[in-house]
């Protein structure tokens, strides 16, 4: 880049005729006196920039190996096998019991040690029945807001052995669950299962009104 006006502070860039890796900036420090006197000095100031050789840092020199792991909990592994409509309360609330079957494989163990796909039914699984005010679709934030409050835990006596209670794989039977009042005005409900205070599976429960 050449000078254009040669005023004080103007800078021109020069580079070598070879690879062009050496660059010099030449700047105008001050202009000559007008008229030029014999004692007026002529001064050039140079600044230099030069590209050095590229250096690549090896991965082994800049990295520090760590083990990467992912933890979490799958959604409860149950399907609704059957249900009973048990009662209508004086307030017009429907009361129901649901049989939940282990989905796709037999349960293991019995009583307090019974598991479905490694999920302990007594210590890990909780459930609740709520009015469907979600249009039938829950986000993760919805059950997070509903638990823990008023949920029910599975107990030893709820466990259904393999082939018991009409199931094939075994599972558990819920306690008597009360829906919203009144049933004929609010027939749409959601049954939500929670496992390990972490993950959920939900089921739309819609009552056909008369």
Image (cartoon, helix red, strand yellow):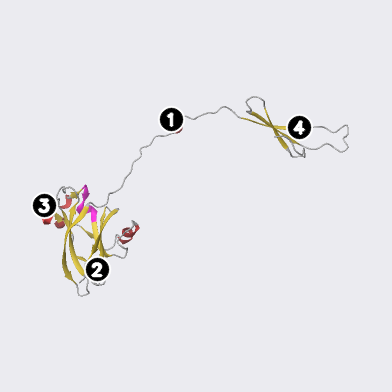
Please tell me whether residue 199 is drawn above or below residue 189 in the rendered image. Answer: above
Q: Which residues are magenta?
A: 117-125
Res. 96 image quadrant = bottom left
User: Circle 4 sits on which residue?
Assistant: 44
Can residue 199 be seen in the rendering of this structure? yes
- Between circles 2 and 4, the one closer to the viewer is 2
CA neighbours of label 1 inside 10 A, class few (<14), some (14 to 19), many (20+): few
Distance between the Cα atoms at labels 2 and 3? 31 Å
Question: Residue 164's quadrant in the figure?
Answer: bottom left
Pointers 1 and 2 in contact (CB under 8 A)?
no
Along the polypeptide, which appears first: circle 1 or circle 2? 1
Instruction: Nearest to the eye among marks 1 and 2: give it.
Output: 2
Name the front one of labels 1 and 3. 3
Q: Nearer the viewer, mark 2 or mark 3?
A: 2
Tell me residue 28's x, y (percent): 76, 36
Q: Is residue 14 above or below residue 148?
A: above
Q: Is residue 123 magenta?
A: yes
Q: What residue is pinned by disc 2? A: 187
SS type, badge 3: loop
Q: Which residue is mark 1?
A: 60
Disc 4 to disc 3, C-alpha distance: 98 Å
**Residue at mark 3:** 163
User: Residue 69: horizontal and vertical position, in percent?
Assistant: 33, 41
Q: Element type at marker 2?
A: loop
Tell me which label, 1 or 4, sits earlier in the chain. 4
């Amino acid at each position: 880049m050449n000078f254009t006006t040669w005023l004080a502070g103007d800078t021109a860039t020069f580079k070598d005729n070879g690879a062009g890796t050496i660059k010099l900036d030449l700047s105008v420090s001050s202009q000559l006196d007008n008229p030029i006197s014999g004692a007026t000095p002529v001064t050039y100031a140079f600044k230099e920039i030069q590209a050095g050789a590229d250096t690549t840092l090896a991965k082994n020199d800049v990295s520090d190996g760590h083990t990467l792991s992912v933890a979490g909990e799958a959604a409860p592994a149950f399907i609704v096998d059957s249900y009973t409509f048990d009662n209508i309360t004086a307030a017009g609330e429907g009361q129901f019991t649901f049989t939940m079957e282990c989905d796709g494989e037999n349960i293991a163990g019995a009583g307090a040690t019974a598991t479905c796909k490694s999920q302990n039914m007594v210590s890990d699984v909780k459930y609740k029945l709520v009015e469907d005010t979600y249009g039938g679709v829950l986000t993760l934030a919805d059950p997070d807001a509903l638990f823990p409050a008023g949920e029910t835990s599975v107990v030893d006596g709820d466990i259904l052995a393999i082939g018991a209670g009409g199931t094939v794989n075994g599972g558990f039977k819920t306690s008597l669950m009360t829906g919203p009042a009144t049933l004929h005005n609010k027939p749409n409900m959601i049954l939500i299962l929670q496992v390990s205070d972490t993950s959920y599976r939900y089921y739309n429960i819609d009552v056909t009104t008369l």
